[in-house]
Image: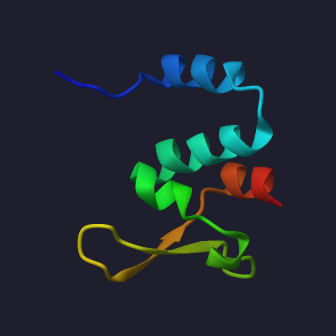
Amino acid sequence: MSKGFTELELQHFLRSVKNEKFGLRFRYHAYLGLRIGEVCKLQVGNIDFDKRELAIKSENSGKMDSLLIPLDLFKETV
């Protein structure tokens, strides 16, 4: 059984989130596949604005990972 949202369900859910900060965090969770704990620890300092990359510490391995932020999500961030 899939527990994920369909694209339509995700768009409906994101439109219903009224708090911009939470909406942006949900978008990072959905579009980058971040775990909730990883999303909660996000800070502006984690973003390399020149490379459009997000640096996060993986909850499972404890290693630093670098993820390319999709352009639409990046535009919402800046």
The image quadrant where one finds the N terminus is top left
Q: Image check: 58 left or right of 18?
A: left
- The one nearer the camera, 78 or 40, is 40
Residue 39 shows in the view: yes
| Residue drawn at (62%, 47%) of the image | 25
Q: Check the image and name the residue furthest to the right.
A: 78
The residue that appears at 72% across and 71% down in the rendered structure is 44
Indicate the colouring scheme: rainbow
Q: Is residue 23 left or right of residue 57?
A: right
In the picture shown, does residue 22 fall above or below 46? above
Count of numbered circles in the view: 0
Side of 24 where 31 appears, left or right: left
Report which quarter residue 12 is drawn in: top right
Residue at horizontal 70 percent and vertical 22 percent from the top: 15
Displayed quadrant of residue 6:
top left
Quadrant (top left/top right/bottom left/bottom right) for the C terminus: bottom right
Q: Nearer the viewer, residue 13 or 37?
A: 37
Q: Residue at x 52, y 55 (%)?
A: 39
Q: Is residue 4 above or below residue 50?
A: above
**Is any atom of residue 33 visible in this view?**
no
Asked if 44 appears above or below 28 in the picture, the reply is: below
In the image, farthest residue toward the left: 1
Closer-to-camera residue (60/31): 60
Report x, y in % for residue 3. Answer: 28, 26
Residue 58 at x, y percent in the picture:
35, 71
Q: Is residue 73 above or below residue 3?
A: below
Q: Using residue 38 as the reference point, say whether residue 4 is left or right of it.
A: left
Residue 38 in percent (x, y) is at 45, 60
